[in-house]
Amino acid sequence: KTQCPKPPQNKDLTRILHPLRCIWQAMALLPILEYPDPRLKKVAAPVTSFTPDLVRLVRDMAETMYAAPGVGLAATQVDVHKRVIVIDVSETKDDLLVLVNPEIVAAEGEAECEEGCLSVPGYYDKVTRAARITVRARNERGEPIERTAEGLLAVCIQHEMDHLIGKMFVDYLSPLKRARLAARQRKKQRLAG
């Protein structure tokens, strides 16, 4: 008899990952595109219907993000060009935030933070973003969300939303840094196969 794995300690993730008994076995880790893949530059389309396929995408994105491990993932990074992001900046990984069709409705202040990206593994650099934001979106079931964020959560929301418009944190860097990074990534890809 097949034993079900123990559900994660994340109340929101459990709702998404385990809507049915043992559904966890059907989840998929999605391949993450790496810079300078041109598909990362595609602009994501708005989600127009909230279906079981969307719930499945969110579940797979969350599982992929946690496995990477990362604190945020945009659908663009897994070659799905829909306005969907998942984020969990908690240390215990039990506070999943799902934002579908997010829009920043207020931003204030300025903060410089060192950022990294699952699509640019091993590279970190400083980026200046709004220090405090309010985001409006829907969750995977189509329910409206409005959240004010600061600190790492504000940075992460802005970072992931950039992916939805085909922009990456490296686009904020100087042309010289971008050229060096692109050369490094191309060399890495050549050596990998």
Image (cartoon, rainbow, N blue to C red):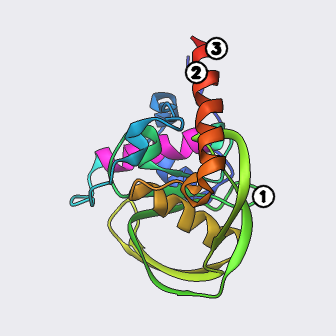
Name the secondary structure under disc 1: loop
Asked if labels 2 and 3 touch by Cβ distance under 8 angstroms, the answer is yes
Neighbour tally class for label 2: few under 14, some 14-19, many 20 plus, Cα within 10 Å: few
Q: Residue at x 37, y 50 (%)?
A: 55
For the N terminus, which image quadrant? Answer: top right
Q: Disc 1 marks which residue?
A: 91
Magenta stretch: helix, strand or loop mostly:
helix
Please say if 109 is above or below 47.
below
Name the secondary structure under disc 3: helix
| Left or right of 126 on screen, residue 42 | left
Neighbour tally class for label 3: few under 14, some 14-19, many 20 plus, Cα within 10 Å: few
**CA–CA distance in space, label 1 to label 2:** 32 Å
Looking at the rendered structure, the kind of residue marked 2 is: Gln
Q: Residue at x 39, y 44 (%)?
A: 57
The residue furthest right is 91
Q: Disc 3 marks which residue?
A: 191
Q: Disc 2 marks which residue?
A: 189
Looking at the rendered structure, the kind of residue marked 1 is: Glu
**Depth check: 41 or 161 in front?**
41
For the C terminus, which image quadrant? Answer: top right
Q: Quadrant of residue 183?
A: top right
Q: Which residues are magenta?
A: 53-65
Please say if 99 is above or below 132.
above
